[in-house]
Amino acid sequence: MVYPGRSHVSLATYVTNTTRNMPPVVQKALFLTEKFGTISVQETQVHKPGPGEVLVKVHSTSLNPIDWKVQRMGLLVTEFPAVLGTDVAGEVVEVGEGVVGFEVGDRVFSHGVFENRHASFQQYTITWAASTAKIPPNITYDEAAAIPLALTTSTVGMYNVSPYGMGLSVPSSDETTGIYAGKPFVVIGGSSSVGQMVIQLARISGFSPIITTASLKHTEHLKSLGAAHILDRNLSSAELLSQFREISSEIQHIYDCVSYPETQQLAWDILSPGGQLAVVLPPIVESSPGKTVIHVWGNSRVPENRKLVAEFYHDTIYGLLERGLIKANNVEILPNGLAGIAEGFERMEKDQISALKLIAHPQE
């Protein structure tokens, strides 16, 4: 039997490793066969962790909009067959050289990348210890799988230094928690995964009032996360601009989690002189002497983000989750394990998912 990217592996070797409670040699993974191609479950190798890496048995992985766009639009990935998915929640089964703070059996979540060793739509994946966090007892694997991409994108946009983020103080201590009290914060697209995380982090940082746009059916949920005002996203830009100005005439911080041209322009019009606008798609507005636009790159491995992500994942997020200060997104479990992801892609492409994360169980 031959597996993608691996020489022949005998069934006897596979059975022996499994019986000894060692990581298996063979696993199932969901492969994108080629650019714009189909996705199918195939057998492939289980990678060995290198220095600074951790091998994780993936119990839960979440679907993000970028996943189906890679398949349908041919974005980002250039080498095939490719394993997609970046949100990992599972159990440590092996640690690489030099790794401290993690041991076999630890429950962890991590933000991966679109590389076959580090992607999440497979039964075992390699994570970087630097962008891996332990899961507190009050958080399930499914809840944890909904966190990584949203957490990384939110923290980078808010707490990384300019020009990569707003340069806000990380709420990692009593001295830095709540220090922005009385300052408004706007979140465009509050019901998105990133939007929900931004609202919660803004609340912990003390911002008030927190104003967001969303479908009004999510009003109570977003208020429970910390939003004070939920404005109907279906209103015209002129109507929204008027409502924003009625609430606050001085808005210095806006995070546009949608970042379509019309939402960026609305945010730019709302932003006060000297303010900062963070966007998650390429900006259509340009920084000027009076206003700054920040294009957030929510990748845990780019050099500009590594230090902040490592510190937040290791020193901050566990306590916030354990104390209930950060809540994971609502989740829906897809049937049929990795094979069920195709249905999830179709529903996401049709815009049928709102204010929740679709979760797959690769071990099924």
Image (spheres, rainbow, N blue to C red):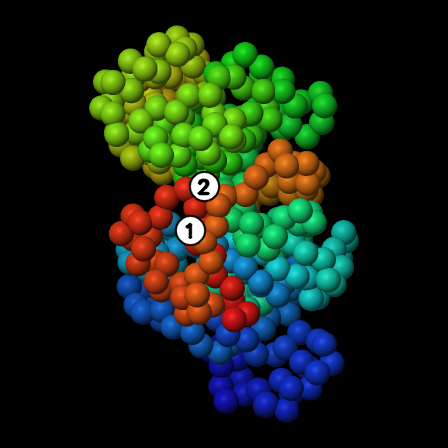
Q: Quick check: marks 2 and 1 in contact, CB under 8 Å?
A: yes
Identify the residue at horizontal 32%, vertical 15% (top origin): 243
Residue at (77, 53) in percent of width and height: 100
**272 w.r.t. 266: above or below:** above
Which residue is the site of mark 2? 193
Horizontal relation, residue 239 to residue 183: left or right: left
Residue 296 in sight = no
Residue type at numbered disc 2: Ser
Residue 152 location (% of width, % of height) = 53, 41
- Secondary structure, mark 1, is loop
The percent coordinates of residue 291 (x first, y second) are: 39, 17
Instruction: Give the quadrant of residue 169.
Output: top right
Q: CA distance from mark 2 to mark 1?
A: 9 Å
Give the residue pinned by disc 1.
64
Which circle marks residue 103 in the picture? Answer: none
Residue at screen point 43% across, 14% down: 251
